[in-house]
Image (cartoon, rainbow, N blue to C red):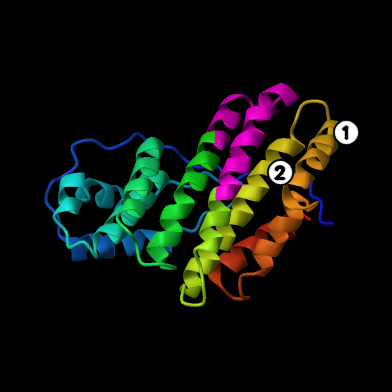
């Protein structure tokens, strides 16, 4: 079993939500801005990472009114882009609402849009948990930790649903993105446990109590399995390998 004891985490920089979203929409331009942001937005553990500026432009462009005017086949992609941009720029409740709207727009089965929209609630939950934990001094009592565990169990259900939405037609890059964020969520959860007040004996008991939820598996074992599911040389696998190696 892989065990780490560390105080690092992947913080999510939460920014104020933008207002005055434009009703006009040049969808091709917005897609280009989103892809520029998405491809450059490599999140590293242990660092504050601001959202790329293109995410703000995407959010400003994709108003509800503008999305409603798109062809029905484009709406799931628009909602996906808006949800991701809102998550990364800290408009978390809006991101959750956008993911629900996107799924209601019937994205193609097993598509990038379906998988990412299904994942968003888990990523929002993780951002909320980490932000609150940092504000509390990064050291919870077991009583303070209890709702965190419940929230992470819910997040894992969202990630499992996203996993179930994938099949052989799902792009490899989407599979890597899912695996990376599964790894990241599990590592953040473990980090909070490792820093519980009361020391390693308290943390070990909490970890033992979690295992029955995952057929006896340990959080970090699951995280490592997610890491190894990403092909060697993939940019996200490179990040995971480097981060794991630096904390062994």
Q: Residue at x 60, y 52 (%)?
A: 184
Contact flag, marks 2 and 1 (Cβ < 8 Å):
no
Q: Is residue 124 above or below residue 172?
A: above
Q: Residue at x 83, y 31 (%)?
A: 202
x and y percentages locating residue 25 in the rendered image: 14, 55
Residue 147 located within the stretch drawn in magenta:
yes
Describe the element under mark 1 as helix, strand or loop: helix
Is residue 97 in view from this perspective?
yes
Quadrant holding the C terminus: bottom right
x and y percentages locating residue 85 in the rendered image: 35, 49
State the residue in front, 242 or 121.
Answer: 121
Q: Residue at x 56, y 73 (%)?
A: 234
User: How crowded is the residue under tag 2: few (<14 C-alpha within 10 Å), some, or many (20+)?
Assistant: many
Span of residues in magenta: 129-157
Residue 21 located within the stretch drawn in magenta:
no
Earlier in the chain: of badge 2 and badge 1, it is: 2
Q: Is residue 241 left or right of residue 15?
A: right
| Residue 134 placement: quadrant | top right
Describe the element under mark 2 as helix, strand or loop: helix
Disc ID at residue 201:
1
Is residue 8 in view from this perspective?
no
Is most of the magenta stretch helix, strand or loop?
helix
Disc 2 designates what residue? 190
């Amino acid at each position: 079993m892989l065990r780490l004891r560390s105080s690092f985490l992947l913080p999510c920089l939460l920014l104020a939500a933008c207002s005055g979203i434009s009703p006009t929409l040049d969808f091709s331009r917005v897609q280009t801005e989103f892809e520029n942001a998405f491809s450059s937005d490599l999140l590293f553990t242990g660092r504050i990472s601001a959202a790329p500026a293109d995410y703000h432009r995407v959010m400003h462009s994709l108003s509800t009114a503008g999305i409603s005017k798109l062809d029905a086949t484009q709406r799931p992609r628009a909602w996906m882009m808006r949800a991701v941009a809102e998550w990364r720029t800290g408009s978390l409740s809006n991101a959750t609402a956008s993911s629900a709207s996107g799924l209601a727009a019937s994205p193609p089965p097993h598509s990038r849009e379906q998988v990412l929209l299904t994942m968003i609630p888990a990523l929002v939950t993780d951002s909320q948990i980490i932000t609150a934990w940092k504000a509390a001094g990064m050291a919870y009592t077991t009583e303070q930790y209890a709702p965190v565990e419940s929230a992470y169990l819910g997040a894992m259900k969202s990630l499992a649903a996203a996993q179930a939405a994938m099949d052989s037609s799902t792009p490899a890059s989407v599979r890597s993105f899912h695996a990376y964020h599964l790894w990241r969520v599990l590592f953040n959860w473990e980090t909070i446990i490792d820093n519980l007040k009361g020391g390693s004996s308290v943390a070990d008991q909490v970890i033992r109590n979690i295992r029955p939820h995952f057929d006896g598996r340990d959080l970090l074992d699951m995280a490592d399995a997610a890491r190894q599911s990403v092909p060697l040389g993939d940019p996200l696998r490179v990040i995971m390998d480097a981060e794991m190696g630096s904390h062994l």
